[in-house]
Image (cartoon, rainbow, N blue to C red):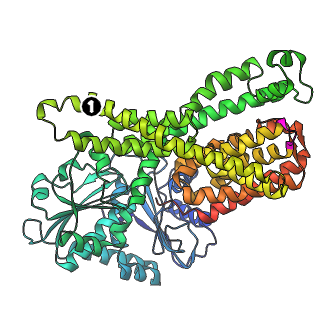
Amino acid sequence: MQITDLLDRKSIYLGAKVSSKEETLDRAVALMAESGKIADVETYKKGVYAREEEGTTGIGEGIAIPHCKSAAVKQAGLAAMVIPDGVDFDSLDGEPVHLLFLIAAPDTADNVHLDVLSKLSVLLMDEDFTNALKSAKTVDEFLSIIDKAENGDAKQEEIPTISEATKKILAVTGCPTGIAHTYMAAEALEKKAKELGYAIKVETRGSGGAKNVLTAEEIKEADAIIVAADTQVPMDRFHGKKVIICKVADGINKAEQLLTRAAEGKAAVYEAGGDAAESKETEGKESVGHQIYKHLMNGVSHMLPFVVGGGILIALAFLIDGLLVDLNHVPQYLIDKYGSVADVKSNFGTLTPVAYFLKAQVGGVAFSFMLPILAGFIAMSIADRPGLALGFLGGAIAANGKSGFLGALAAGFIAGYVVLLLKKIFSKLPSALEGMVPILLIPVFGLLITGAGMVYVIEPVVGFINTALNNGLKNMSGANIILLGALLGAMMAVDMGGPVNKAAYVFGTAQIAAGNYDIMAAVMIGGMVPPIAIAIASLLFKNKFTEQERKAGPTNFVMGLSFITEGAIPFAAADPLHVIPACVVGAGVAGGLSAAFNCTLMAPHGGIFVFPVVGHAAMYLLALVVGSIISALLLGVLKKKVVA
């Protein structure tokens, strides 16, 4: 099937003038509808927008390829727009889009839209081709340019086969959602290999599955292999070969560098590791930052259900207690039960039977799994299944000790690399003892080493930091109250449940007993800002968050209003260098404003549900809104766009 077979003259618009991405998509859908290939325009349009929510189809260099496969499509088709002045399309490179192709494909098993998309991606890699399309004066000229390029591409001199060449390079390209990148990387590598005189074969692993699959014989004869992928690739087949592993974007933008390295043999020899092959593919062959990101994502994705589910149930507990118990006039039966008014307030969230069930027996239990799950699946990402038990142990020690969230992060990486070290040590044992390694030796020695590292290294260091911070806070208590409020608010957002957060919280609760209720107000508002800010940012700046983060983001409104700062942890763990500073600034502003407004709080927890006992509640709410908006705007500025 040819690209021109799918392009109806009615669906080509040259000289388009549009002012926004939404207007551009709406106009493109209307063009597609004019061809008569859409049975239900609204359903198709929703599908186009849904695909855009997964990640922008603005692939860079002024090009966008939105697409949708839907039962609303009667016949496969294309619509095209040339936008001379350009339009902001949230493209990966931030540049305006001047050339757009919209794809419509029926919901059939042949995946025709993927085939067409791959052809388009290949052609659009040619700058002369795209410039010619942008300069076309008539629809006929536009179609003629595509026809000549497509037919000419088929007649090009082929790259020498692997068996003929002196330098034999293989490559694999793949991306998780951005289909175009798979084929654009393949085209860039093939084109540059031809210029350099190398033979190459590229296996593409797009949404339509693996194509042009590498054979065992080709792998055996290859001088080097390039894996340019942001998704898992079967790696065991490359055991003993020189392999370069990089992001799919590098395959597009750094094709010459990758091919030169491969031809010169400047690549590490890949060693498969059985069950751990998928995790070992990253070891020592890509940037440290990329490795850490992948491991963190594995921990965060498994932790998220516990954070969201447990957090919502805890929030419901606070809501129920807030509706049924008046903390301004504590019932005598509760005072008799808990011993004093202060003790009643400290148990807010578990005062009524239903609240106790939701918080103490279900939600709190689910929440308690958060840090062990985080550490366990970080370790599993590094060392596969043997790392899971060690990570769980380290995370549990962090959760029950002083190190908290930061300790769990450390535990995950310690556990993973301890397993890799033990595997290397035990690989020298006689073959008769190999069966004991995964079921006996690694669990016993691994748990011992990880536990010792957490108990005797991580916990004492963080405990020392905690003590130092507490002493520093006490020395500041008589100084500038606004500065102290800002400092405490900021500290609540630094590690979101970790040692710095706990230091501020413990200081705040201690001040309640001393009658300094303004301190606890600054502490709680600082802990409420990060989740609320993330929820706002996930709605305002959707291109800065992954699909999973966008879905989970709004739940942080509930967590933030309930003073559950930990709701922000998955987002902070995924992008700490940008999320944490943004949250710290907004939380600090909120804490400082709370102190400046002389807001007070007699309850140590509860969020918005204890606002009835807040002094100057209206100003307290204003401080919360201002701090949350500041953090949300900073998130929009600091965070990078998500690569599709």
Residue 306, compared with residue 257, is above or below; it is above
Q: Residue 114 appears at what percent x and percent y?
A: 36, 56
The residue carrying mark 1 is: 441
Q: Is residue 60 left or right of residue 588?
A: left
Q: Is residue 51 left or right of residue 343?
A: left
Q: Residue 460 appears at what percent x and percent y?
A: 53, 42
For label 1, count other residues whose C-alpha is less than 10 Å away and answer few (under 14), some (14-19) or many (20+): some
Report the amino acid beneath label 1.
Answer: Leu
Q: Secondary structure at mark 1?
A: helix
Q: Residue 551 appears at what percent x and percent y?
A: 58, 45
Q: Is residue 469 left or right of residue 400?
A: right
Main structural element of the magenta stretch: helix, strand or loop?
loop
Residue 635, compared with residue 422, is above or below; it is below
Residue ranking furthest to the left: 164
Q: Is residue 43 visible?
A: no
The image quadrant where one finds the N terminus is bottom left
Q: Is residue 543 left or right of residue 608?
A: left
- The mark tally for this picture is 1
Q: Residue 283 appears at what percent x and percent y?
A: 31, 54
Tell me which segment is drawn in magenta: 513-517
Q: Is residue 242 magenta?
A: no
Task: Kindly identify the residue that appears in the image at 85 percent across and 37 percent down.
Answer: 602
Q: Give the camera-side residue of 430 and 189.
A: 430
Residue 544, compared with residue 389, is above or below; it is below
Residue 104, compared with residue 410, is above or below; it is below
Q: Give the camera-side residue of 459 and 447.
A: 459
Q: Is residue 141 visible?
A: yes
